[in-house]
Amino acid sequence: MDTPQTSFSPTPAVPPVVPSHSDTTSSKHTSVWLVGGVLIVLASIVGYFLFWTNGGTVPLPDGTVVQFHTSAGSESYIVARGQPVRLSGLAGFEGLPFTIIEAVPSYLPNEQVVLAKVPAESGLVLGTLRQDGSFYPIIRDGKEKSSLAVRPDGLTLLGAFSGASSTLILLNLQASDHSVIEVGEGWGARLGSDGSFIALSSKGLIRIDASGTESAVIDRADSNIQGAISPSALIVALSNSATGQLDFFKIKSTKPAISAYLGSIFVEGSYAVGFTDDETVVLKIGDTFTVHTVPVHPQ
């Protein structure tokens, strides 16, 4: 079923108002009315961007961040003045000699596991960042990386990109050698509520255990699959090439694999899917962004 949506697009330009000089008094009154009208139009446009409503809520206020993870890479955007702006790094990490792209809590207190863009190095560096700003690199192999997921015991899953494909890699931050296990093709890793890792792949939604062994949670074999996993790892969006829809599921358990179908959104063409922290759905279709709530299938 379709859900309400809104689109972001550039604010249309408003032509300048040039008052007549034939009658000073008349031109002043005319200018006031015209300028007032322009301001009302502009306020309406800004209001459209900032406050589209769905069930009385405002899902994308300024400051909202959304990430898009695909098999070809990742992009992050922040809503500023009602429009999405591409982020080059995470806010809150200014003043460092490198740029933090992703950060998640480490298994140690006062430390975060990060993906950093370090000057003079290609790709992204996986490392740990302490509260005092000390940075300890762990993997600096020149590859682009994304979608960090870290367990309380230090076991870490992330995607490493080579060309247009992504490989999931697993390592233990507590191990002295930080040896890497290549799990296989996949991206968009999340830490599930049961402590297991889940990720997307051309097989559908998969679960990865501590040994790096994968198993199916939702079977959906498709070499061009698109989708996303919500921050809570409870909601998953998966494209359905047979119907042209984006299907949503609630994950009840990964072992055994139990999920519930929630509903669908019809989407045409190529797109990327992202979730905000409150699990609002954002689709990026070319340069257009549309906002949706997670559909709920009638019971």
Image (tube, rainbow, N blue to C red):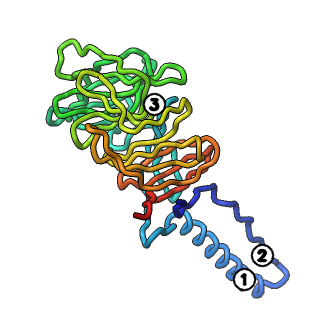
Which disc, if any, is residue 19?
2
Taking the image as shown, residue 90 lies to the left or right of residue 151, namely right
- Of residue 21 and residue 186, the one placed in the foreground of this image is 186
**Residue at the (67%, 78%) spot, across then down:** 37
Residue type, mark 1 in image: Lys
Q: What is the CA distance from the residue labelled 1 to the residue labelled 3? A: 68 Å
Contact flag, marks 1 and 2 (Cβ < 8 Å): yes
- Residue 49 higher or lower than 134, as above or below: below
Which residue is outermost to the left?
A: 109
Residue type, mark 3 in image: Lys
**Residue at the (52%, 43%) spot, across then down:** 239
Which disc, if any, is residue 28?
1
- Mark 1 or mark 2: whose residue is earlier in sequence: 2
- Residue 278 higher or lower than 193, as above or below: below
- Of residue 129 and residue 275, the one placed in the foreground of this image is 275
Residue type, mark 2 in image: Pro
SS at mark 1 in the image:
helix
Looking at the rendered image, the disc whose residue lies closer to the viewer, 2 or 3, is 3
What residue is shown with label 3?
203
- Mark 2 or mark 3: whose residue is earlier in sequence: 2
Look at the image and tell me in which quarter the C terminus lies.
bottom left
- Residue 275 higher or lower than 108, as above or below: below
SS at mark 3 in the image:
loop
Disc 2: CA contacts within 10 A as few (<14), some (14-19) or many (>=20): some
